[in-house]
Image (spheres, rainbow, N blue to C red):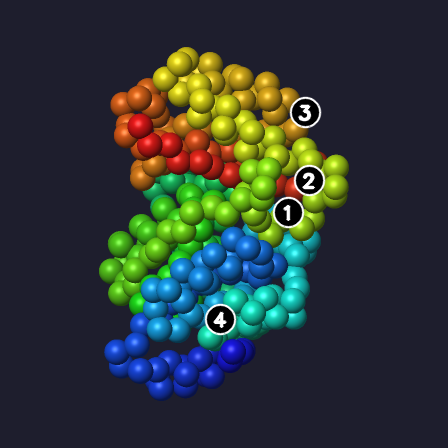
């Protein structure tokens, strides 16, 4: 496994890459888990070489304390990636990625006012800047993103579409623990008690799924709020799978997504499930 730290090294690698070879990229912020490894496995299956980037992007944190507490374990991550058969890892530092503070910014229309866009202002601009930089520098043929961050996935799909980037974005289903908790780097910050409480997100989503078509949307929302009354629920939304716009009548849409965000004490977790009628 080759580890690259500078853009210059990366450009050298890219110039020597086989003309007819396919490169798959898995962008990450490190603190890797089985969910990330599923993306690497998909990249290995579908391309000739799999690359992972590890970079904790400061621009996508609207809370500096959250950035400071984000788990960092690069040495462990590299061992995990080598075991998973990853071919190349790009591990730049902040000065390498942002030689100067970016002047460009992105707006994503109505998505800025829904769910993550509403509660984390500026977040998607930071995501779009770093993903644009990685795609421009690395020039992968395919890039793999997990469906757990569903709204982020949509933002990246629109970014690539609207800027006519020559890369295919591949969504990969959420990987879960045995009790249903969606795998997330933030789970590493949970205490044993918090970890037990965190499963309420998935339980609430499954309860909402079972109630679709049996009661009005507003009624389902009220039940979920009640289920999360002991935690700090930020949002629960029943939305159209592709547009992520809210559904007033889920039965009218063949595919909907149930999306949730809540704090377990100071640790913010998100999850979603996609439901096909």
The alpha-carbon separation of the residues under discs 2 and 4 comes to: 30 Å
Mark with earlier residue (2, 3) = 2
The x, y position of residue 74, in whole percent, is 63, 68
Query: Which callout, 4 or 3, points at the residue further toward the start of the chain?
Result: 4
Marks 4, 1: nearer the viewer: 4
Is tag 2's residue or tag 4's residue first in the polypeptide sequence? 4
Q: Which residue is mark 1?
A: 187
Q: Marks 2 and 1: in contact by CB < 8 Å? A: yes
Q: Position of residue 56 (x, y in %)?
A: 57, 61
x, y percent for residue 21: 30, 77
Reading the chain from its start, which is encountered first: label 1 or label 2? Answer: 1
Write the residue at 44% across / 80% down.
10
Q: Residue at x 42, y 70 (%)?
A: 50
Q: What's the CA distance linking mark 1 and mark 2? A: 7 Å
> Which residue carries the number 4 mark?
86
Q: Nearer the viewer, residue 11 or 80?
A: 80
Q: Position of residue 271 (x, y in %)?
A: 51, 39
| Nearest the eye: 246 or 204 | 204
Q: For the point 34% across and 36% down, which residue is it?
A: 241
From this view, report whether residue 231 is shown above or below residue 103. above
């Amino acid at each position: 496994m080759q580890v690259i730290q500078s853009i210059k090294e990366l450009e050298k690698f890219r110039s020597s890459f086989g003309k007819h070879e396919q490169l798959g990229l898995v962008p990450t912020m490190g603190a890797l888990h089985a969910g990330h490894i599923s993306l690497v496995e998909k990249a290995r299956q579908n391309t000739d070489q799999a690359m992972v980037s590890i970079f904790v992007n400061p621009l996508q944190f609207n809370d500096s304390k959250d950035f400071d507490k984000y788990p960092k374990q690069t040495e462990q991550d590299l061992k995990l990636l080598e075991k998973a058969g990853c071919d190349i890892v790009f591990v730049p530092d902040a000065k390498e990625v942002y030689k100067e503070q970016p002047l460009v910014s992105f707006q994503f229309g109505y998505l800025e006012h829904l769910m993550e866009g509403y509660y984390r202002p500026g977040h998607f601009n930071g995501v779009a800047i770093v993903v644009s930089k990685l795609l421009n520098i690395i020039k992968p043929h395919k890039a793999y993103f997990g469906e757990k961050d569903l709204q982020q996935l949509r933002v990246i799909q629109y970014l690539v579409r609207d800027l006519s980037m020559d890369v295919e974005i591949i969504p990969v289903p959420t990987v879960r623990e045995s009790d249903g908790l969606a795998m997330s780097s933030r789970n590493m910050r949970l205490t044993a008690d918090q970890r037990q409480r965190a499963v309420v997100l998935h339980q609430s989503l499954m309860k909402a799924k079972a109630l679709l078509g049996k009661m009005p949307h507003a009624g389902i929302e009220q039940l979920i709020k009640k289920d999360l009354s002991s935690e700090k629920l930020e949002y629960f939304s029943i939305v159209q799978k592709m547009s992520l716009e809210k559904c007033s009548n889920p039965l009218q849409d063949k595919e909907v997504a149930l999306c949730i965000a809540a704090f377990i004490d100071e640790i913010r977790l998100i999850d979603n499930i996609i439901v096909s009628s």
